[in-house]
Image (cartoon, grey):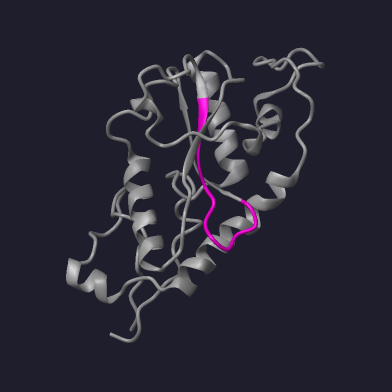
Amino acid sequence: MTRQISLFPAGDGEPPAAPAAEATELRISRAQLSAWLQRIADHQQPLLQKQPAPGRQMDLLGSASGATSIEQHAEELAPLALAPRHLQFWRWPSPDLSGAAIYLVMDQPAGLASPLLLYVGETGRADQRWKGDHDCKAYLSAYREALVRAGLESQPTIRFWSDVPSGSAARRRLEQALIQRWQPPFNKETRSRWATPFHAGPA
């Protein structure tokens, strides 16, 4: 009988994490982790290479033919065109961020040709959202620890997209459209798709 190893902390109804001694024994191997990363890259890399359509005025009511819907606007996101920031950017004396934004947590793991989009979030205050406790931070911490143990390097960054609706309802719709398009593994909506395929040997 085999047991599945979770790459991330338990939550959202998942079973409790294994005791520390067992977790060490069932540590994810470099090959297993690389395969998991590659699966995500296979979905996202074509989206990173696709050139977005020129920016158009958004029509949140869908009434003007020359404007874009939320779904069309989601297709215009070009993550690599956004400036990468250190994850501790909010500690800077004068962060140059403000207002509504969609934010993206990305990484460039060693061995992959292009970065991975790990998480998509939305905020009404870009200078404050990453401050304090955050669900994604726990996932990111476990992810980075797994990479270190496997001897793989990572370069996580956060990027902000300010071309978004100021209203929270419309912004959340855009966030959900982006999650469905990019399938980032740390968002709760898509975790089941990327459940780690790593198993221990016979128990």
Q: Residue 160: horizontal and vertical position, in percent?
A: 53, 28
Q: Report which quarter residue 146 is drawn in.
A: bottom left
Q: Report which quarter residue 19 is drawn in.
A: bottom left
As displayed, is residue 110 above or below residue 119? below
Q: Residue 43: horizontal and vertical position, in percent?
A: 64, 54
As displayed, is residue 202 above or below residue 80? below
Quarter placement of the C terminus? bottom left
Q: Residue furthest right?
A: 66
Quarter placement of the N terminus? bottom left
Q: Is residue 132 left or right of residue 84?
A: left
Q: Is residue 99 left or right of residue 77?
A: left
Q: Which residues are magenta?
A: 102-114
Q: Residue 134: horizontal and vertical position, in percent?
A: 32, 36
Q: Report which quarter residue 63 is drawn in.
A: top right
As displayed, is residue 173 above or below residue 35? above
Count of numbered tags: 0
Q: Residue furthest front?
A: 93
Q: Residue at x 48, y 14 (%)?
A: 99
Q: Residue furthest bottom?
A: 202
Q: Residue at x 29, y 50 (%)?
A: 11
Q: Residue at x 45, y 63 (%)?
A: 152
Q: Residue at x 30, y 74 (%)?
A: 26
Q: Is residue 89 left or right of residue 75?
A: left
Q: Residue 42: horizontal and vertical position, in percent?
A: 64, 59
Report if residue 197 lies within the magenta region.
no
* Residue nearest the observer in this picture, 201 or 132: 132
